[in-house]
Structure formats: C-alpha cells, structure tokens
Image (spheres, rainbow, N blue to C red):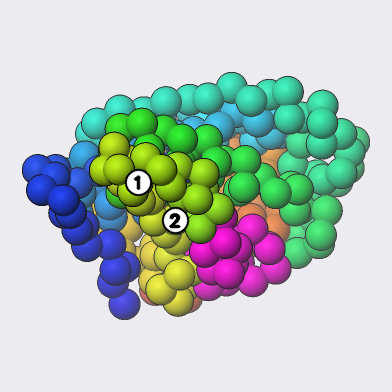
Amino acid sequence: MTAVVAASKKDGDKRTAVVVVLSGGIDSACVAAIHSRNYDETYGITFSYGQRADREVTAAKKFAEVLGLKQHKTVDIGFMRELYGDTNVLTSTERGLPGSFDYSIVVPIRNAVFLSIATAWAFSINASRVAYGAHSGDTSYPDCRPSFAKKIEDALNEGEIDGITSGLRRRVEIWSPYNTGMSKEELIIDGMRILGDRIFDAWSCYASGARQCGKCESCVNRRRSFKNAGIADKTAYLA
C-alpha cells in the first residue's frame, strides 16, 4: 500500500508545499521522505519540548539534510516539560519506561501543540498540507486518530477563515498515514524505498544514549514492524 500524498495545485499556484512534523523517529522520517518525492517544496519542523529522548532532534536534522528539505526549523518549547511535570514518562525522568503501552506514555495533547505551530508556519508560507507520522497502529493515542486530525484541521482553518476566503491564505489539510489506514509496516516499506539503510538512523527510543534501548514500548514496536515488513532490522540496540 502506497501513501496517498499526491500534491494538488489550486488557485493558480505554481508550486506545492507541505510542512512535515519531523520528530526524528522512524514514522516521521518516512512521512518526510514520501512527501519529499511528491511535493515541490517540503519543509520540516522539529520540536524540542523537554523530551527525554533528545537524540531524536539530532536524527531529525540529519534526515532534513539527507532529504534536501527546503527548510528545517527546530523549535524550542522546552518550557512544556515544566508544565507537563510528572504526568508522562516521556518528559519525566522520575518514572520508568514501560515495555508495552501504558497511558503514562501519552503526553497531553502533544500533537495539538505541534500541529498548531506547524500550521501557523504553513499558513505563512502558503503550504497546503501539514503532515505528521501517526499510523493505524496508533489507536491508543487520542491525538493520533483521524477524528482528532479532522477536528483540529477544521478549527485551525476556521482561525484563518477570512484569509482563506479572501485568497490570502490557502486552506491547510492535516494529514497522517492513519488518515488513509496505513500501518507502520506499510509506512516503513514506502520509506525504505527512498531512504534505504538510512532509515535505521531514525531514533525511536524513549530514552537517550549511545544506542537505542530495544526494550521500551517504542523500540519494541520498531523491532516488530521491521520483522512484519520483512526487512532485516540493522538497528544497534542495547538489548
């Protein structure tokens, strides 16, 4: 199954543009890779929000270079870590990292924060789409579901409705692989065709270190997905 990411040109625009929320993880790296082949201009935006896995920011910068993105921004919203406190394990170091899904992994409306900022940029550069890496396996995460994406898309466009109506702004679509029913395995297969072995440079681990732990929920999902996709996983794990 191939991601449906065909660009559309409206109102006489001579180029198509997309903003990809590029975390540095494997899902967002694949989404960025796919869009870089389908849009005239692909912009990447990465958020440093006080996450334990700060290695993913470094990975995002590498993918931006490899894919030749038009522009890549790293936005520091580290103050969110203080706001989140110990509500989740991704920003708090006081709690252990689970090996399977637990609600402690959910960072409160993280994608709403990311998508709002990314869409503000999209409106500013006349991009028609904001893409993020949620896939059909992300059913446990409320802000990954297509129903959420549609609601925030409508709300953000309503916030610029006068600009859209007057032709000063383009309506922005909030897109994810989940919107088209793509699984993580399908996403990896599509991304692998473009990235080759560079795909293994993506940082999935919830922790930071010399190597990915191999035991946290995200590492477990990564290993399983490569296996299910029939791709030999060349990632160097600690365990």
Q: What residue sits right under mark 2 in the picture?
A: 174
Q: Closer to the N terminus: mark 1 or mark 2?
A: 1
CA neighbours of label 1 inside 10 A, class few (<14), some (14 to 19), many (20+): some
Task: Find residue 176 and report its image quarter.
Answer: bottom left
Residue at 75% x, 64% y: name it: 101
Residue 122's disc number: none
Let me know if residue 11 appears in the view. yes
Asked if labels 2 and 1 touch by Cβ distance under 8 angstroms, the answer is no
14 relative position to 118: left or right = left
Horizontal and vertical percent for residue 190?
Answer: 30, 64
Q: What residue sits right under mark 1 in the picture?
A: 164
Amino acid marked by disc 1? Ile
C-alpha span from label 1 to label 2: 16 Å
Residue 187 vs 31, above or below: the answer is below
Task: Find residue 45 and report its image quarter.
Answer: top left
Query: Which portion, as a residue range, is magenta?
Result: 131-152
Q: Between 35 and 65, which is closer to the camera in this rendering?
A: 35
Horizontal and vertical percent for residue 110?
Answer: 66, 45
146 relative position to 32: left or right = right
Horizontal and vertical percent for residue 210?
Answer: 59, 31
Residue at 45% x, 76% y: name it: 181
Which element is circle 1 on?
helix
Q: Between 197 and 76, which is closer to the camera in this rendering?
A: 76
Residue at 73% x, 30% y: name it: 80
